[in-house]
């Protein structure tokens, strides 16, 4: 006998509370839920999102707001009362507030900044003054810094007093009298050290720091390589100006991954969610690359026109053009995707170009040989059952197709693997060497290889 569960889902519980129209009960219900559950309710009840945020305590509202999608954040701010908006913006961590303001137009940002209290306004304007996609835009000024002359006892008292407002207390930052970063010390070192011991005695001078103008993507690699939850940020004078935490790096990694996937697909990176971006802007981001690729493919038509006489004499050669082009494009797309991904995670560096080329030459020959044998076998076997399709010179046609496939696949793997490295060397984004772009380059040269092989084998026979 089965027992039907009578437990209500989160959404059903919320609807039940809403029906009672009791503000206190709604507040109690929302404040008793995990932040992730409140965010889920907001996403499932978009029309009530502003009222849900307004019902939360200001601290929980800020914690929920910062994990929502940008489109939802904009919607909430647009409908939230001015007083609640001011409370929310002032409560948000400086780095999360800066990330949100970056997504808005200048006029809206100007109005929202007016709502900040003087201290938060100063911090926000400072962060917005750093270059876009720089570490300075990500950092937060909420950290614990101590003097190297302090004792462990004084440090612990300082942490108890100010640690609640810090983004993290896992690491304590040591500065000198000029505010310059001297070291970073894990809090466990202070917990187990004698109270009278000085900070200078605990510091070893070995620390890793980011610069305010460092690129965010490069900073995420520093986090990955050093297994840190937070890193200090310094300026040109090595003065400690903030810290960057791992949660910010996770957002950066997610955004960079999305941009690379879009570029690999042959389009400019979208700076808004797909369903939120205006259609005209989406058109502009897609049309540029389509025009570039179209102009490239026109060279394919030019190449076919150059071999027009050969095609007229042996129409059978035209049957294999799609096969040759597709094989070269597919092999190039494979190689470019592999190398772009390897470069993104620092498995391949610019200095590895020769190792990459050597591997792709071997891979290209092996892959092309397999496809070449299959192509040759297909022509020969098919001719045994349908002798009129390829004619009496089917064996030579098969050889031309097989050898062409080896050359085209080899060319595709070399182009696909080397192009990202060349672009990186020139200072461009390797992801620009997308699969459609590589395929377009290989199409033209693939036709040249194919008709050259056909001319070599069929000269004096069909040609």
Image: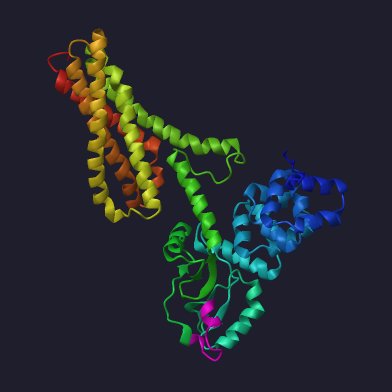
For residue 163, what is the image quadrant?
bottom right
Which stretch appears magenta? 187-200
Q: Tell me if residue 308 can be seen.
A: no
The spot of residue 245 in percent (x, y) is 54, 65
| Residue visible at 85% across and 57% down in the picture | 24
For residue 367, what is the image quadrant?
top left
Which quarter shows the C terminus? Answer: top left
Q: Is residue 181 left or right of residue 42?
A: left
| Residue visible at 73% across and 56% down in the picture | 33
Q: Is residue 189 magenta?
A: yes
The color scheme shown is: rainbow
Q: Is residue 443 left or right of residue 15?
A: left
Q: Is residue 157 left or right of residue 395?
A: right
| Residue visible at 54% across and 77% down in the picture | 187
Q: Is residue 47 above or below residue 283?
A: below
| Residue visible at 84% across and 55% down in the picture | 25
The spot of residue 378 in percent (x, y) is 26, 20
The spot of residue 82 in percent (x, y) is 77, 57
Q: Residue furthest front?
A: 1
């Amino acid at each position: 006998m089965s027992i039907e569960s009578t437990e209500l889902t989160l959404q059903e519980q919320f609807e039940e509370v809403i029906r009672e129209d009791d503000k206190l009960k709604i507040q109690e219900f929302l404040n008793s839920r995990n932040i992730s559950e409140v965010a889920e309710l907001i996403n499932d009840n978009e029309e009530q999102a502003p009222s849900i945020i307004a019902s939360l305590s200001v601290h929980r509202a800020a914690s929920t707001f910062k994990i929502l999608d940008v489109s939802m954040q904009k919607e909430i701010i647009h409908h939230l009362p001015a007083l609640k908006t001011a409370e929310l913006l002032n409560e948000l961590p400086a780095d999360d507030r800066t990330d949100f303001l970056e997504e808005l137009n200048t006029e809206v940002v100007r109005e929202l900044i007016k709502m900040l209290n003087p201290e938060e306004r100063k911090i926000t304007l400072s962060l917005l003054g750093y270059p876009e996609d720089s570490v300075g835009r990500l950092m937060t000024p909420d950290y614990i810094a101590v003097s190297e002359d302090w004792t462990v006892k004084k440090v612990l008292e300082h942490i108890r007093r100010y640690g609640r407002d810090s983004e993290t207390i896992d690491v304590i930052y040591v500065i000198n009298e000029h505010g310059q970063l001297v070291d970073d010390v894990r809090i466990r070192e202070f917990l187990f050290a004698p109270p009278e011991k000085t900070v200078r005695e605990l510091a070893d001078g070995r620390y890793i720091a980011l610069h305010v103008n460092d690129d965010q993507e490069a900073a995420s690699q520093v986090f990955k390589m050093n297994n840190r939850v937070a890193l200090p940020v310094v300026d040109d004078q090595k003065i400690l100006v903030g810290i960057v935490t791992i949660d910010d790096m996770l957002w950066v990694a997610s955004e960079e991954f999305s941009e690379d996937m879009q570029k690999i697909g042959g389009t400019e990176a979208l700076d808004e969610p797909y369903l939120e971006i205006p259609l005209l802007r989406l058109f502009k981001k897609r049309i540029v690359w389509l025009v570039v690729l179209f102009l490239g493919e026109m060279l394919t038509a030019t190449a076919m026109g150059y071999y027009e006489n050969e095609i007229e004499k042996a129409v059978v050669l035209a049957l294999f053009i799609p096969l040759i082009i597709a094989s070269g494009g597919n092999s190039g797309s494979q190689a470019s995707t592999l190398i772009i991904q390897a470069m993104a995670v620092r498995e391949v560096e610019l200095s590895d170009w020769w190792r990459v080329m050597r591997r792709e030459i071997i891979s290209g020959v092996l892959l092309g040989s397999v496809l070449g044998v299959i192509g040759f076998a297909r022509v020969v076997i098919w001719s045994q059952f349908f002798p009129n399709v390829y004619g009496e010179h089917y064996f030579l046609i098969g050889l031309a197709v097989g050898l062409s496939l080896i050359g085209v696949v080899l060319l595709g793997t070399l182009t696909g693997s080397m192009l990202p490295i060349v672009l990186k060397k020139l200072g461009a984004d390797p992801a620009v060497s997308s699969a459609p772009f590589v395929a377009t380059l290989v199409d033209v040269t693939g036709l040249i290889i194919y008709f050259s092989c056909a001319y070599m084998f069929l000269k004096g026979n069909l040609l």
